Image (spheres, helix red, strand yellow):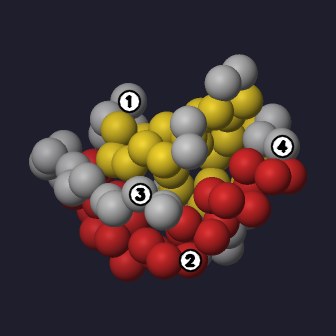
Amino acid sequence: MPEISRFLGIIIAMFYNDHDPPHFHAVYDDQNGSIEIKTKKISGNLSSRIQEIVLEWLGLNEQALLENWELAKARKPLNKIKPLE
């Protein structure tokens, strides 16, 4: 699972050649979730606090995430995305 960002203990990653819709994965300790980029729908067991942080980061990086999604589907190297500060 290629890591594209890391902040506040949260790891953000995308799988190569993953299924639609465009999404990414967030892992924090024993919590993990899948977040759809366009709808912002979250699946998994992320706490509400972590969900809020991840959605804030998504709001700042939606275009970069969609670009990485296309790269992942093409099995090309993914770009790192600036962490939330």
Which amino acid is tagged 4?
A: Ser
Is the residue under label 2 in contact with that under label 1 (CB below 8 Å)?
no
Q: Earlier in the sequence, mark 1 or mark 3?
A: 1
Which residue is disc 2 drawn over? 59
Is the residue under label 2 in contact with that under label 3 (CB below 8 Å)?
no
Answer few, some or many: residues within 10 Å of disc 2's Cα (few below 14, many 20 plus, some between 14 and 19): few
Residue with the most extreme top position: 30
Real-space Cα separation, disc 1 to disc 3, in angstroms: 17 Å
Residue 11 is at least partly visible in this image: yes
Residue with the most extreme front position: 85
What percent of the width, then of the height, locates residue 83?
Answer: 41, 57
**SS state under label 3:** loop
Which residue is disc 3 drawn over? 83
Q: Nearer the viewer, residue 7 or 37?
A: 7
**SS state under label 2:** helix
Q: Earlier in the sequence, mark 4 or mark 2?
A: 4
Say which residue appears at 56% left-offset and 45% top-offset.
8
Which residue is disc 4 drawn over? 47
Which residue is disc 1 drawn over? 1
Which amino acid is tagged 1?
A: Met
Answer few, some or many: residues within 10 Å of disc 3's Cα (few below 14, many 20 plus, some between 14 and 19): some
Real-space Cα separation, disc 3 to disc 4, in angstroms: 19 Å
Real-space Cα separation, disc 1 to disc 4, in angstroms: 21 Å
Q: Earlier in the sequence, mark 1 or mark 4?
A: 1
